[in-house]
């Protein structure tokens, strides 16, 4: 346990199960009918199976995988929104999870009201919000829209506001789900800059991204998921990204030991081009 | 789960302070959203009970009004408390599901949405209550120190409402049929609450059966204090504290059991 001092997040054999085909999907009448006739059965669906990884302070983990690989579900478990069906999850420090931020706003309220509500949800104090409100609106470039209804904003504005509110979090562990890519070109630059500043402060980060370029640039560890299974967890980020890109073209999933082979093939192919 | 998480006194106080702000904002939101885009706005929460009262008075006034003294106030006690019960449980029922987009993205205690819905209903209730007191003045009801005792049934009903709201909102996440079932329950309960009639016409045994209806207990507590200026008998006083306790117990138990499953059903 000599290393344990530095470990801020440890995920051991974490599995998350969804249940389908029960009440939720069939309704009360069908449920009673099927119970009576004995035709009732539920299907299980494992969104994540036996995922294990450990992060030390300052690590940046990139989580990659195709759609439906269980990335977002895993992040929900780490952030405490979901409880794993089995396995252990140890977290040390304050977590901030920025998941699909543009959702969960209230369309009928104004921009200002929504800003305060979101601030409260993210755990900011009232004084903090009063103090930072102008700064948030200025950052999001929404000065003229403060009293507008939230639904009148364009989707780009919505995500800009979401990001602007969220970037004041001061967590020990930061969880990001594709929030790096928001807004138009100018705002994207600004947001990436802010993100870098937050991450430079010794935060441990987990982030899901479909942009391999940013994973390669930022992460020092990588977790590859596929249909809920862990393909690999490694600190050889470049190699793993290469292998993943090769997998994206060939559609054949490598076993853990095949990853260097895949990476090599990918390198060969890019060299040819 | 978080064995490494330090639960220092400082962090707990911090957490409470954080949630207080969230709570405030949620109450504000629920309140604003209720009257958004209405011309009369908050005035509705005063107007609606008055209209209900008027309708009942017109319909039942000649029929029951003669045998029941202070019939307007008698009716008002019934509609006031029953609407409070109906509103809290109805808005509470949908509170969990409607806020699912929030708690499936951000880790906040889910019961906070229930409590904030209850508090905005309480504010509405207090508005109607002030109109109720105005009516009492018009109807020459004498105000004695006993009026202060009304805090007791109000507090009891508030806790009872929260307990019931908790219970039905948990069920509503799993069975959307709850909304319709609960409407039927509410209608039945309304007719069994002796809102526009008096239980005196029933034989004593049946009168006791009314006490099985928690809302009736609070209504008769109110009537006893306001109209007769008398402290209700011990049965009603005891039941007024037993019912909230039972409701809260069942509500919390169900919530605690299902709490972690909500996310799979929203």
Image (spheres, coloured by chain):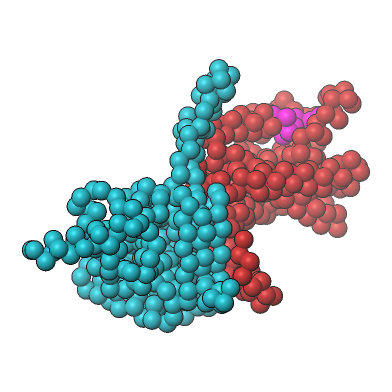
Chain colours: A cyan, B red
Above or below: residue A140 compared with residue A89: below
Q: Which percent across, then down, holds residue B205?
A: 88, 25
Magenta-colored segment: predominant secondary structure: loop
* Residue lying farthest to the top in this orientation: A37
Residue at (74, 39) in percent of width and height: B215
Residue at (8, 63) in percent of width and height: A272
Quadrant position of the C terminus of chain A in the picture: bottom left
Q: Is residue B228 left or right of residue B166?
A: right
B203 part of magenta stretch: no
Tell me where the magenta segment starts and ends, as one range: B191-200
* Residue lying farthest to the right in this orientation: B234
Quadrant position of the N terminus of chain A in the picture: bottom right
Q: Is residue A163 left or right of residue A5?
A: left
Residue at (39, 78) in percent of width and height: A198
Q: Which percent across, then down, holds residue B200?
A: 84, 28
- In which image quadrant can residue B78 be found? top right
Q: Which percent across, then down, holds residue A14?
A: 51, 54
Q: Which percent across, then down, holds residue B241?
A: 82, 48
The one of A173 and B99 positioned closer to us in this rendering: A173
- In which image quadrant can residue B9 be found? bottom right
Q: Is residue A35 visible?
A: yes
The one of A178 and A38 positioned closer to us in this rendering: A38
Q: Is residue A89 left or right of residue B153?
A: left
Residue at (55, 54) in percent of width and height: A87
**How many numbered marks appear?**
0
Q: Is residue A151 visible?
A: no
């Amino acid at each position: 346990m000599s290393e344990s001092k530095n470990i801020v997040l440890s995920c051991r054999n974490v599995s998350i199960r969804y249940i389908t085909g029960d009440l939720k999907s069939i309704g009360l009448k069908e449920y009673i009918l099927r119970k009576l006739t004995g035709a009732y059965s539920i299907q299980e669906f494992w969104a994540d199976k036996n995922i294990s990884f450990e992060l030390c302070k300052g690590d940046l983990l990139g989580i990659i995988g195709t759609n439906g690989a269980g990335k977002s579900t895993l992040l929900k478990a780490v952030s405490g929104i979901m409880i794993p069906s089995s396995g252990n999850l140890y977290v040390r420090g304050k977590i901030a999870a920025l998941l699909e931020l543009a959702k969960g706003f209230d369309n009928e309220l104004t921009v200002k009201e929504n800003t305060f509500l979101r601030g409260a949800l993210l755990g900011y104090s009232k004084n903090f919000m009063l103090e930072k409100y102008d700064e948030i609106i200025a950052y999001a470039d929404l000065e003229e829209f403060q009293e507008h209804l939230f639904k009148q904003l364009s989707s780009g504005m919505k995500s800009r506001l979401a990001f602007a509110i969220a970037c004041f979090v001061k967590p020990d562990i930061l969880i990001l789900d594709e929030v790096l890519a928001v807004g138009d070109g100018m705002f994207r630059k600004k947001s990436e800059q802010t993100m870098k500043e937050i991450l430079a402060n010794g935060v441990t980060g987990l982030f899901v991204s479909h942009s391999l370029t940013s994973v390669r640039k930022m992460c020092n560890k990588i977790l590859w998921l596929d249909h809920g299974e862990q393909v690999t967890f490694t600190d050889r980020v470049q190699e793993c990204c290469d292998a993943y890109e090769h997998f994206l073209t060939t559609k054949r999933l490598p076993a853990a030991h095949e990853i260097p082979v895949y990476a090599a093939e990918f390198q060969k192919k890019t060299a040819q081009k | 789960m978080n064995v490494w998480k330090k639960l220092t006194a400082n962090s707990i106080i911090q957490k409470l302070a954080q949630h207080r702000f969230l709570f405030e904002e949620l109450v504000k939101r629920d309140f604003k959203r209720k009257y958004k885009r209405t011309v009369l706005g908050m005035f509705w929460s005063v107007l609606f009970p008055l209209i209900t009262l008027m309708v009942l008075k017109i319909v039942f006034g000649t029929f029951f009004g003669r045998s029941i003294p202070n019939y307007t106030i008698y009716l008002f006690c019934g509609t006031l408390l029953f609407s409070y019960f109906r509103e809290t449980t109805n808005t509470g029922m949908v509170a969990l599901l409607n806020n699912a987009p929030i708690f499936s993205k951000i880790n906040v205690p889910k019961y906070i949405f229930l409590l904030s819905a209850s508090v905005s209903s309480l504010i509405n209730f207090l508005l109607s209550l002030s109109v109720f007191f105005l009516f009492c003045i018009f109807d020459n009801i004498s105000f004695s120190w006993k009026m202060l005792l009304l805090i007791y049934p109000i507090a009891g009903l508030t806790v009872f409402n929260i307990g019931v709201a908790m219970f039905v909102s948990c069920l509503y996440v799993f069975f959307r049929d709850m909304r319709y079932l609960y409407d039927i329950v509410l209608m039945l309960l309304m007719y069994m609450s002796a809102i526009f009639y008096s239980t005196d016409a029933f034989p004593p045994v049946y009168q006791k059966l009314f006490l099985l209806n928690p809302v009736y207990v609070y209504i008769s507590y109110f009537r006893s204090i306001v109209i007769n200026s008398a402290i209700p008998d011990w049965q009603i006083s005891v039941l007024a504290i037993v019912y909230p306790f039972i409701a809260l117990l069942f509500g919390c138990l169900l919530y605690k059991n299902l709490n972690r499953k909500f996310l799979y059903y929203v």
